Amino acid sequence: DIVMTQSPDSLAVSLGERATINCKSSQSVLYSSNNKNYLAWYQQKPGQPPKILIYWASTRVSGVPDRFSGSGSGTDFTLTISSLQAEDVAVYYCQQYYSTLFTFGPGTKVDIK
Amino acid sequence: EVQLVESGGGLVQPGGSLRLSCAASGFTFSTYWMHWVRQAPGKGLVWVSRINSDGRDTTYADSVKGRFTISRDNAKNTLYLQMNSLRLEDTAVYYCARDPGSNNWYVDPPFDYWGQGTLVTVSS
């Protein structure tokens, strides 16, 4: 199975400042035949189901604010919130869909400092 | 409007069984993969199982393989999860999630819609 890890476990950022979350997979999720990274990012607010933000490591889902961006390739990925807003307080998860044993990272909690 | 509504959760003793349902509406259910994902209280997301659009291909997390069975009834627009030999560690909110399938990820993202979840509590 592909194991996903995230860092940090939690972070507190001032409103308007940048938040950066890292995700690492135990093996590459880059499919060489199409040069696509099978990596997604989800946001989960308290009491709500998760919501997908980004897939293919860097493609924003329609309607997601452009302050959210994804980068990385192979085994190392980053989710960046360029200017944190109050409504961004949530837990963020990365997930690989390279394998049909889909796996999530443990999550990173983002709070306001 | 896409809607996924889970039901069937509740309190069950260790070793017992439970069947969860996920009623789908607002889209052509028979053309989508479906997943079950669970979340223990205060913990992270754990993928449980996936079924393809016609129900002939299924995959399971190692933690539930041999105990849980995913199935679907495309005529009833309903996804199921039969859970047997339940353990304390199966206690969680169980979400169903829609997925356009690997051939369609170039157009639409995986796990694009989720239900609100149903709570399963395994306790004596």
Image: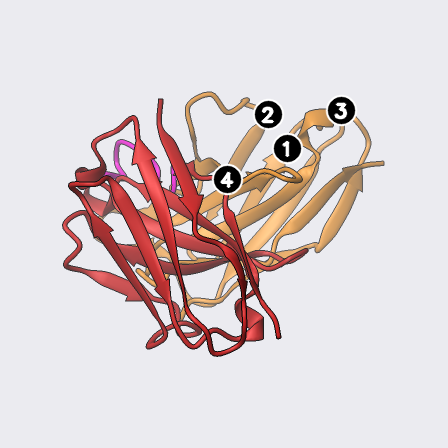
Chain colours: A orange, B red
Q: Residue at x 70, y 47 (%)?
A: A109
Query: x and y percent of residue B86 in the render?
Result: 47, 73
Query: x and y percent of residue A84 in the render?
Result: 71, 28
* Residue situated in front as seen by the camera: A17 or B97: B97
- Give, as a three-letter code, the residue at label 2: Arg
* Protein chain holding label 3: A
| Mark 1 vs mark 3, CA separation in Å | 9 Å
Whichever of callouts 1 and 2 sits on the residue coming sooner in the sequence is 2
Q: Residue under circle 1?
A: A81
Q: Which mark is residue B116?
A: 4
Local SS, label 2: loop
* Protein chain holding label 4: B
Query: x and y percent of residue A67 in the render?
Result: 59, 25
Local SS, label 1: strand
Q: Which mark is residue A16?
A: 3
- State which region is magenta: B104-112
- Give, as a three-letter code, the residue at label 3: Gly
- Give, as a three-letter code, the residue at label 4: Gln
